[in-house]
Amino acid sequence: MRILSGIQPSGELHIGNYLGAIKNWIKLQNDSKNECWFFVADYHSITENYDPKEKPKEILDLTADLLSLGLDPEKSVIFQQSQIPGHTDLTWIFNTITPLGELERMTQYKDKAASQKQNINVGLFDYPVLMAADILIYKSEAVPVGEDQVQHLELTRETARRFNDRFGKVFPEPKPLLTETPRIMSLIDPTKKMSKSGGEKSYIAISDSPETIQEKIKTAVSDTGGGKDKRGGYNLLEIFNAFAETKEEKSDYSNYKRYHEEGTLKYAEFKPALANLIANYFADYRKKRAELSGNPDYVKKVLADGAQKASAVAAKTLQEVKQKLGLII
Ligand code: AMP
Ligand code: TRP
């Protein structure tokens, strides 16, 4: 199966990104039946307010993070979106078959437009069309993402269908691949999804030190309203379950879950255990990441090699598309 996914270089990776998407990328990559493509969505990231001086570092840091978490350039094609001109070429073509009304319905657009009122740019609106082009230019069949991207995937399928019906079959209709934890909630407001925009205390960055993780979990909202509203507690338990690997950790989880249901869970015990579990899980990552920090040339080389492979496939699809559209003279 041809698998593809992307992630924006805009600040630190958090455990929501990891549990909703990246953990799955690594699992899929390590199954030799799959052909995997993963990229840094820098063109998507410039639709939000940002500082151009910081962007090169954000791109390199994210790539180094992905490599340290286990993405392997021997097994996956790893590249930077803006280095492949075909993505934006195909976006323009898809723009001409996308009804305005479908983009107006996108919840991520509505949320972001509300949160950056001074900068509601056309790129923010067109974001899902660029995403469809990212996916379809490689004729990808499956896209591992978190739940918040499912609506964009529906638009991608619709775009493929519309194109194929009008011009002849070129594209597959890619499906989303979700993990068991497709939506991790904020630590300070369990009614909202975990995201960087919620502030530092709302998320755990994968690069957080064990001490910081302890502090953040300590202040995390658990059960509120005298134990009536258990959403915060459920979220913490879900995170524990997702990071539990050994038999012992899994059996600890079952116990904590039972105590929580019975209303006898002692957070003074559970919270430090959860923080420990997360900190240990990322110990290996922290070591590899420290090594890569001193080697930006290696990271750049990975992206350059990936761009070469991606460009060849993208150019081929674009040629096929232009042929169908009647643009080849
Ligand atoms: P982003 O940081 O928005 O580029 O997201 C990168 C990936 O992480 C996407 O596949 C998202 O769907 C996923 N993701 C982001 N936030 C969460 C969350 N709170 N829970 C699960 N997955 C998430
Ligand atoms: N929009 C995705 C996000 O914010 C990132 C992304 C861009 C993506 N292009 C993609 C994900 C193509 C999967 C496939 O998370």
Image (cartoon, rainbow, N blue to C red):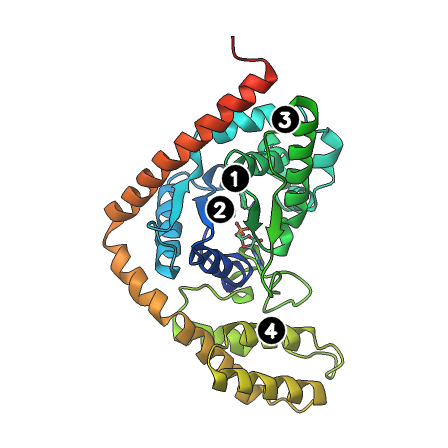
Q: Earlier in the sequence, mark 3 or mark 4?
A: 3
Q: CA distance from mark 2 to mark 4?
A: 25 Å
Q: CA distance from mark 4 to mark 1?
A: 30 Å
Picture residue at 59% right of the left edge, 75% below the top: 236
Tag shown at residue 238: 4
Tag shown at residue 95: 3
Is the residue at mark 1 in contact range of ligand 2, meaning its CB lies under 8 Å from it?
yes
Q: Earlier in the sequence, mark 2 or mark 1?
A: 2
Q: CA distance from mark 3 to mark 4?
A: 40 Å
Asked if the residue at tag 4 contacts the one at tag 3, i.e. Cβ–Cβ closer than 8 Å, the answer is: no
Given residues 43 and 213, the one toward you in this image is 43
Asked if the residue at tag 1 contacts the one at tag 3, i.e. Cβ–Cβ closer than 8 Å, the answer is: no
Q: Amino acid at mark 4?
A: Glu
Asked if the residue at tag 1 contacts the one at tag 2, i.e. Cβ–Cβ closer than 8 Å, the answer is: yes
Q: CA distance from mark 3 to mark 2?
A: 21 Å
Secondary structure under tag 3 reads: helix
Within 10 angstroms of label 2, few (less than 14), some, or many (20 or more) residues?
A: some
Which residue is the site of mark 1?
44
Of badges 4 and 1, nearer the viewer stands: 4
User: Based on the displayed image, in which of its 4 quarters is residue 93 positioned?
Assistant: top right
Which residue is the site of mark 2?
8
Q: Position of residue 37 (x, y in %)?
A: 45, 45
Given residues 75 and 216, the one toward you in this image is 75
Q: CA distance from mark 2 to mark 1?
A: 7 Å
Q: Amino acid at mark 2?
A: Gln
